[in-house]
Image (spheres, grey):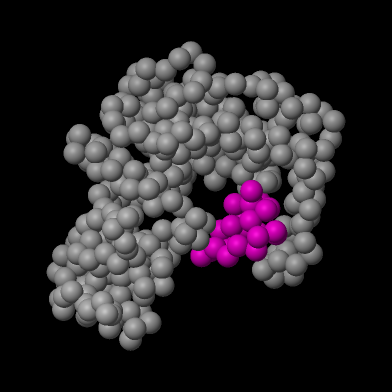
Amino acid sequence: MNRQPNSDLETSQKRQCEDSNDQPRRVVHHFFNPDLAENFEITRPTGTGASGSATYILSRPYTTKKHILKELPRNLPLEKIEWTQMFSHWLRTSGYTATPIATPCRINGRSQQCFNPMIASDCDGSSWQCIEFMDGCPRKSPTTQDVQVAIEAIAALHCRAKSFPTPRPRELTGWQRRVRQLSSILCSPRIFPNKSNFSTTLSDEVREWCNQFYSLLRSPEVVRVLTRMTSHTMPTMKMPVLQDCWWEHILFSENGQTITGVIDFDSANRDDPAVDVSRLLGSWQTENALFTERLVDLWPEAFEAYTQTYHCKPDFSTRVQRLHDTAIICGLDRWFSWVLVENRQFSNMHWVIERIRRLFLATPHALKRLGAD
């Protein structure tokens, strides 16, 4: 006997799935009742950067409250998203008000085996989450005070996060993954196909950067530096951190005196808190072409503010710098693979080109600092 729909709601949802090509509107019905779902204005955010996932802003007339509807990467385990949602919610309920909370589903098409009340499954097999929209603006070129305010907020998050009880399955730390990638760069020649999704002009430019980058990495002096890096060990700290603590994910109040939002928890995991400080300060350094300085020399007040809030070992600034400099090398290696080998498409390819260019320009300075490490 064929299974019959167990409710009018399920029948309505099935009809929507069959009859509508408006996927975001369709997915919204998983999270909100029909009257509310139909009343949302659905727009694309202007600054999607390197995101490869569909992302929409949900807003309604006569209210300032908004939501973010985001498709989850298909290669990301849903259990990982479940953990990040719990982590963000736990921070919020512990008094850290800058983290967004996920919206529960009204209905869920996934099987009970992998059911999660805050992850919706669409009829095409894609998974989605709906989270609070956090007000505020990121600072692309921050003042010294901006950097200090942001770092103090990250330190406060870390102070609370270390008490988060929910474990994660054993995984490699960020540094262990970095060492593995550096070893691969040293041992495996990079081979890139002749065709890509870029226009001819852009493709030629990116390929020239690519050729120069790997030619530099094959020089005897750089090989010695990278080989020495692969023998370094870093403390194995298994506390919850954001990992993708990019400058655009830190939102400031209008007067810049407080942080109103710390967003995009999808990459959160257990690791060394130096990862977040390295990622945030490093993203500001490369964004503003401040390539030559060590992070602690650029923003000594930020390091002092962090250590006053969160207790660190004496080698903290060294760990932060080593993570940043190797992230430049490994990040550029990944970007070349994504765009020249895998032909990945991103929502803003011009942003991608600019990101590759900045990492390329930062590479000689990162290698120089690593050589002196």
In which quadrant of the rendered view does residue 293 lie? top right
In the picture provided, is 353 more to the left or to the right than 73? right
Q: Residue at x 37, y 48 (%)?
A: 79
Q: Residue furthest right?
A: 220
Q: Residue at x 82, y 28 (%)?
A: 221
In which quadrant of the rendered view does residue 208 lie? bottom right
Q: Is residue 66 something that shows in the picture?
A: no
Q: Is residue 70 magenta?
A: no
Secondary structure, magenta segment, majority class? helix
Image spot of residue 157 (x, y percent):
31, 32
In the picture provided, is 91 more to the left or to the right than 296? left
Q: From the viewer's side, name the closer residue of 259 and 82.
A: 82
Q: Residue furthest front?
A: 1
Q: Is residue 110 something that shows in the picture?
A: yes
The answer to whether 8 is drawn above or below residue 299 in the figure is below
Q: Residue at x 67, y 68 (%)?
A: 197
Q: Which residues are magenta?
A: 334-357
The quarter of the rendered structure image containing the C terminus is: top right
In the picture provided, is 206 more to the left or to the right than 283? right
Image spot of residue 254 (x, y percent):
28, 48
Image spot of residue 196 (x, y percent):
71, 66
Q: Is residue 344 magenta?
A: yes
The answer to whether 320 is drawn above or below residue 56 in the figure is above
Q: Residue furthest top?
A: 314
Q: From the viewer's side, name the closer residue of 260 and 232.
A: 232
The answer to whether 53 is drawn above or below residue 154 in the figure is below
